[in-house]
Image (spheres, helix red, strand yellow):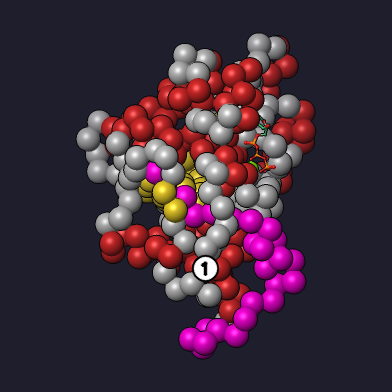
Amino acid sequence: MRTISIVNLKGGVGKTVTAVNLAAILATEYAQRVLLIDADHQGNTSKFYRIPAEPGSLADLFEGTVMCYTDIVQPTIYRGLDVIPADMSLAALELDGQLPEDVHGGLPRDRALRALTDLRDAVIEDDAYDFIVIDCPPAFSIASISAIAASTDIVIPLMPGQFEIDGMAELIQQIDGVRRTNPAVRIAGILCTMTYRDEMVDEVIRWLRKHSPVPVFDTQIRWSKPMGRAVMAHEPVCEWSPTSGAARDYRAWVREYLGGVLDGEKA
Ligand SMILES: Nc1ncnc2c1ncn2[C@@H]1O[C@H](COP(=O)(O)OP(=O)(O)OP(=O)(O)O)[C@@H](O)[C@H]1O
Ligand SMILES: [Mg+2]
């Protein structure tokens, strides 16, 4: 089973759009069983799939008020695709850093940090899903560190621009942080998002391919008008506008990313 975290410290780079569409493509086009976890207190993934944070959310798992992931999993309208939602209660937990006494004796903070690893192990034991996809917040919060610690793969969506070049050192630090947390994690690659025909964009991508210490996917996700509409309609872009540029790009990227798996390798 692969556990894929969608990570970048920068906001608004397409993490959520990548997470919700990757999860949808895996479930609807490859008949995979997918658990999509919203690890961002903004709750964009939860809102996208119209999943309320009741009766429980990721914060409950971190706080230990629910013991089993199955208590907070909710189905979507798409066969094979389930969601664990998040809301602002995750931010409250992050802000004061106060977690209730751990009745099991461990350090509460440590328990929160390993919460998603424990979840992943339980999912493997239950053989409940083929993929876990985690939408991370634009920060190294408890939730994102917990996600990285549980992951086999990290995908880094990145909007090509000058700030991204300037932020390269920060990105490398971020990647090193990932490796310290979980040495087994594979940086699957940087996914260039919201690209458009422009010399500057091409130049940034060329620069990235040359200087990035981690792989850069061949496939780019172009900026595509139907994507905004699909998000407003709460529909994966491949459902909303199957022939749009973004739908074709996300399909092509999933094919590139999971080529070995789709050719018969076990996920
Ligand atoms: N390929 C695309 N074409 C057009 N618009 C896009 C595309 N990808 C993302 N967007 C839009 O860009 C905005 C930011 O995307 P998204 O919310 O996925 O970023 P994010 O990295 O998750 O942000 P945050 O860090 O705040 O969680 C959204 O309004 C989304 O609809
Ligand atoms: Mg997001």
For residue 6, above or below residue 74 = above
Q: Give residue 183's position: percent from left, percent from top.
A: 47, 58
Provide the residue designation for mark 1.
61
Q: Front-most of 240 and 184?
A: 240
Asked whether 187 or 128 is in front, the reply is 128
Residue drawn at point x = 22 percent, y = 35 percent: 264
In the foreground, 83 or 190:
83
102 is within the stretch colored magenta: yes
> Which element type, helix, strand or loop, lies under badge 1?
helix
The image quarter in which residue 29 lies:
top left
Choose top left, top right, bottom left or bottom right for residue 221.
top right
- Looking at the picture, how far across and down is residue 72, in whole percent? 47, 61
Identity of the residue drawn at 41% across and 32% down: 25
Residue 176, image x and y in percent? Answer: 60, 53
Number of disc labels: 1
Above or below — where is 165 with respect to 147?
A: above
- Say which quadrant the C terminus sits in: top left
**Closer to the camera in the image, 171 or 88:** 88
Task: Provide the residue span drawn in magenta.
Answer: 81-106
* Rendering quadrant holding ligand 2: top right
Q: Is residue 113 at least partly visible in the picture?
A: no
Amino acid marked by disc 1 = Leu
User: Local crowd at mark 1 within 10 Å, few (<14), some, or many (≥20)?
Assistant: many
Judge whether residue 28 can be spotted in this image: yes
Please give the name of the residue rendered at 35% of the width and 65% of the height, measured from the top-left corner.
122
Residue 101 forms part of the magenta stretch: yes
Position of 139 relative to 24 (above/below): below
Q: Is mark 1 within 8 Å of ligand 2?
A: no
| x 41%, y 69%: residue | 68
